[in-house]
């Protein structure tokens, strides 16, 4: 084999690995886009991965028709992957902001299938070309496939641990597209003697490259203006952490925090939420020396807990360090949480709440569960019998816990299923709901090892919202939001505890909120 042929075959193997890295990054990027914009991460990743793989199959089948001009066909496939994939995230945000509802999902699924199909054409062409220049077919196939599979692993790790947290979804798409284009240009140069109209193809590469570089430097800023359309108030902070998209907005004194598009609080009425979450369990517990807060990375629940001088230690467990760091450093959040992260009685642990309860061997007088709603698999495990059993095992006799439980009006079956799940872990419960203008009617569930008597709960004098009379009234539910749930046929709905093995809460949650 001539040196030039050997060099060409080596480049083909490298090209197959690199385009595979790019392909897997686009695949998981589309899943992340769907999860963030459309919700239900498991559903979106399932759809995008299925569509991408189906597209690859279709592309591989179509590749049989490519029998000549293999190099120029590969080059233009890379041009298309670069152009379509590069502008995918940018266009998705624009579609979400301006296009009719539902078209953004259709667009994402079409893009996913298209990039999958183009990716499916790549490898058969590279294998044929390697065989054409003198490499035995079995060897060329094995080597290209090895490069492809190894590249897939690298691409997945790069996206999860570097690209998504460091560059975000818009820049990542443009950056990866630039790599696809670079591979095409290198192949174009190395095989230039075989290519007619080289100037035309080179000019096309230059135009696409200019568009991608412009997108890399300015696309995120423009996409930010699209994203602003998704929020009622001006965005004052936007950050993509390793776990979620963090958005902070402010308008006429009202500060709001969003995580992956879901509202966490509004400063105009957060006191209603956090007083209901914190004051009843602290008033019901025999002692309040040691308090555990699961979630609540904004520090607002911790602020209310530490208004009690009797509290000696508060442990705040929140998975995302970006949230607690923002709450400790951002001027607007510090004004709201009153610099609670400087309080020596507060200890912050950035870890998973489930894992923390599994590994910790101590006890707490009060446990406050201020976690996001169970809208995906990772959050669902924090609403299971197994999780509440761990909570029970860390709650002292005479202690109390309070769990936010979504809306009993908008998601009635979800709320009472959470209550049923807590009871199935061997805890007594009492149910509360309160009107919070930014959320609507919201539900909370108090839990204890012993029966709960609301009349024995002592509320602090410094409460700005709650009163004892109000607290008792909050335990009364209307017929259309009470535990006796009926379906459309008027038949009673049987409540089944949510477990790790049978995660029935996710589907109920999705069905409940799809019209709100």
Image: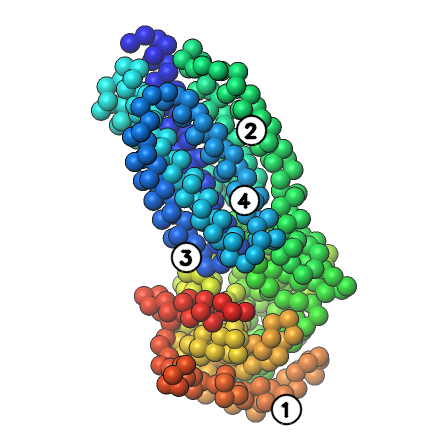
The structure residue drawn at horizontal position 54% and vertical position 69%, both measured from the top left corner, is 516
The 10 Å Cα crowd at callout 3, few under 14, some 14 to 19, many 20 or more, is some
Q: If you read the primary sequence from the N terminus, does the residue marked by circle 3 or circle 4 appear first?
A: 3
Judging by the rendered image, the residue that carries numbered circle 2 is 208
Q: CA distance from mark 3 to mark 2?
A: 33 Å
Residue 497 image-quadrant placement: bottom left
Q: Residue 127, image x and y in percent?
A: 30, 25
The structure residue drawn at horizontal position 31% and vertical position 23%, both measured from the top left corner, is 67
Of marks 4 and 2, the one in the foreground? 2
Tell me, for residue 266, which label it has, or none. Answer: none
- Quadrant for the N terminus, please: top left
Q: Residue 346, image x and y in percent?
A: 61, 64
Tell me, for residue 89, which label it has, or none. Answer: 4
Of marks 1 and 4, the one in the foreground? 4
Judging by the rendered image, the residue that carries numbered circle 3 is 43
Of marks 3 and 2, the one in the foreground? 2
Judging by the rendered image, the residue that carries numbered circle 1 is 469
Numbered circles on residues, count:
4
Q: CA distance from mark 4 to mark 2?
A: 17 Å
Q: How is the image coloured?
A: rainbow
Q: CA distance from mark 2 to mark 1?
A: 68 Å
Q: Secondary structure at mark 1?
A: helix
């Amino acid at each position: 084999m001539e040196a030039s042929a050997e060099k060409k075959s080596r480049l083909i193997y490298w090209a197959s690995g690199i385009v595979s890295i790019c392909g897997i990054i686009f695949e998981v990027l589309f899943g992340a886009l769907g999860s963030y914009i459309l919700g239900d991460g498991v559903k979106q990743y399932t759809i995008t991965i299925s569509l991408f793989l189906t597209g690859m199959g279709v592309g591989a089948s179509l590749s049989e028709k490519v029998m000549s001009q293999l190099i120029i066909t590969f080059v233009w496939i890379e041009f298309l992957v670069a152009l379509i994939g590069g502008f995918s995230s940018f266009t998705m945000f624009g579609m979400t902001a301006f296009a009719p509802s539902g078209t953004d999902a259709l667009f994402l699924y079409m893009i996913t299938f298209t990039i999958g199909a183009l990716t499916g054409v790549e490898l058969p062409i590279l294998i044929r070309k390697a065989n054409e220049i003198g490499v035995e077919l079995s060897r060329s196939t094995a080597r290209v496939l090895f490069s492809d599979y190894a590249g897939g692993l690298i691409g997945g790790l790069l996206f999860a641990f570097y690209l998504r947290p460091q560059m975000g979804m818009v820049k990542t798409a443009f950056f990866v597209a630039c790599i696809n284009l670079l591979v095409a240009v290198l192949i174009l140069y190395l095989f230039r003697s075989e290519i007619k109209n080289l100037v035309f193809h080179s000019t096309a590469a230059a135009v696409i490259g200019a568009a991608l570089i412009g997108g890399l430097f300015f696309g995120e800023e423009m996409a930010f203006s699209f994203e602003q359309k998704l929020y009622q108030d001006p965005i004052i902070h936007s950050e993509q952490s390793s776990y979620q998209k963090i958005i902070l907005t402010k308008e006429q004194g009202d500060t709001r925090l969003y995580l992956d598009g879901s509202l966490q609080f509004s400063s105009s009425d957060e006191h209603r939420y956090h007083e209901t979450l914190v004051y009843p369990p602290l008033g019901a517990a025999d002692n309040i020396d040691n308090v555990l807060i699961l979630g609540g990375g904004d520090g607002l629940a911790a602020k209310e807990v530490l208004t009690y001088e009797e509290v000696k230690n508060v442990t705040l467990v929140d998975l995302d360090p970006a949230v607690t760091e923002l709450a400790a450093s951002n001027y607007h959040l510090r004004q709201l949480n009153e610099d609670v992260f400087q309080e020596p009685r507060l200890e912050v642990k950035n870890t998973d709440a489930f894992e923390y309860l599994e590994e910790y061997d101590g006890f707490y007088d009060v446990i406050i569960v201020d976690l996001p709603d169970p809208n995906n698999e990772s959050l669902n495990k924090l609403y299971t019998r197994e999780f509440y059993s761990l909570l029970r095992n860390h709650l002292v006799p005479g202690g109390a816990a309070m769990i936010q439980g979504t809306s009993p009006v908008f998601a009635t079956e979800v709320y009472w299923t959470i209550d049923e799940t807590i009871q199935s872990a061997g805890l007594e419960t009492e149910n509360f709901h309160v009107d919070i203008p930014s959320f609507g009617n919201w539900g909370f569930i108090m839990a204890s090892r012993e029966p709960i008597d609301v009349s024995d709960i002592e509320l602090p004098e410094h409460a700005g919202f709650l009163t004892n009379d109000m607290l008792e009234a909050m335990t009364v539910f209307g017929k259309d939001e009470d535990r006796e749930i009926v379906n459309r046929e008027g038949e009673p709905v049987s409540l089944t505890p949510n477990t790790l093995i049978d995660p029935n809460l996710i589907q109920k949650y999705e069905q409940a909120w799809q019209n709100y």
